[in-house]
């Protein structure tokens, strides 16, 4: 009887610890990805196009909110330099991770909700999600090589006012 009771306690303890450990492991796995998103925000908020582009692998590609394709970090750097000096000069960028999904040991898909404020204008064809606020959905595909995570591909999609108004009941606007 005591042996059976002891075995039950050991089994229950093992279950508790096995559930706690993956959470810590996931947090450690996600840390470099979250740190990359923090560097992107810092790059935007300091208008540092070089820093922004440095988060991409040499063959990394980015699709912007207008559907424009930047095929490598040099194009990403140049385009961000233009927008940091133009319509988004002095703007403020913040992002919130919505989901991180690992597609293997060395590939992760990171979905972030982005909020840009304090912009002077928006690119032609883009409208603010609400007055003074541009919300976007940013998807990055990260790849780890030699222990370093960088972006292989990203896509940024503007959240239009009409779409925002028709979100399902219970859904909250990002970054509130």
Image (cartoon, rainbow, N blue to C red):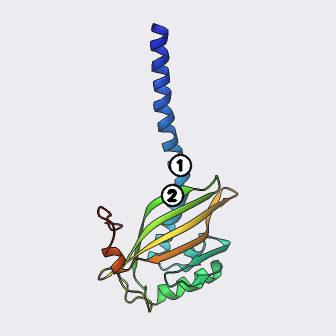
Tell me: residue 128, above or below residue 31.
Answer: below
Residue 137 rendering spot, x and y as whole percentages: 45, 71
Q: Nearer the viewer, residue 83 or 143?
A: 143
Q: Which mark is residue 124?
A: none
Looking at the figure, which quarter contains the C terminus? bottom left
Measure how far apart labels 1 and 2 are at the Cα level: 12 Å
Give the total number of marks visible in the rendering.
2
Tell me: residue 131, above or below residue 43.
Answer: below
Looking at the figure, which quarter contains the N terminus? top left
Residue named by callout 1: 28
The answer to whether marks 1 and 2 mark residues whose Cβ atoms lie closer than 8 Å is no
Q: Tell me the element at label 1.
A: helix
Q: On the rendered structure, is 54 left or right of 158?
A: right
Q: What is the crowding at mark 2: few (fewer than 14 residues within 10 Å), some, or many (at least 20)?
A: some
Q: Toward which corner of the image does residue 166 lie, by quadrant?
A: bottom left
Tell me: residue 5, above or below residue 71.
Answer: above
Residue 42 rendering spot, x and y as whole percentages: 47, 71
Residue 53 rendering spot, x and y as whole percentages: 59, 75
Q: Which mark is residue 100?
A: 2
Q: Nearer the viewer, residue 166 or 68?
A: 166
Tell me: residue 11, above or below residue 63.
Answer: above
Q: Residue at x 44, y 13 (%)?
A: 5
Q: What is the crowding at mark 1: few (fewer than 14 residues within 10 Å), some, or many (at least 20)?
A: few
């Amino acid at each position: 009887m005591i042996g059976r009771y002891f075995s039950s306690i050991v089994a229950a303890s093992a279950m508790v610890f096995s559930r706690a450990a993956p959470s810590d492991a996931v947090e450690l796995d996600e840390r470099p990805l979250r740190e990359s998103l923090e560097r992107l925000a810092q790059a935007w908020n300091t208008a540092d196009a070089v820093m922004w582009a440095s988060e991409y692998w040499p063959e990394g590609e980015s699709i912007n909110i207008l559907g424009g394709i930047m095929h490598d970090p040099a194009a990403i750097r140049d385009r961000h330099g233009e927008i940091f000096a133009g319509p988004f000069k002095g703007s403020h960028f913040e992002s919130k991770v919505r989901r991180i999904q690992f597609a293997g040991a060395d590939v992760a898909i990171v979905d972030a909700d982005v909020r840009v404020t304090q912009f002077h204008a928006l690119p032609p064809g883009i409208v603010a999600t609400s007055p003074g606020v541009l919300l976007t959905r940013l998807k990055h595909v990260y790849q780890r090589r030699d222990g370093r995570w960088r972006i292989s591909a990203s896509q940024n999609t503007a959240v239009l006012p009409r779409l925002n108004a028709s979100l399902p009941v219970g859904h909250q606007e990002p970054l509130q």
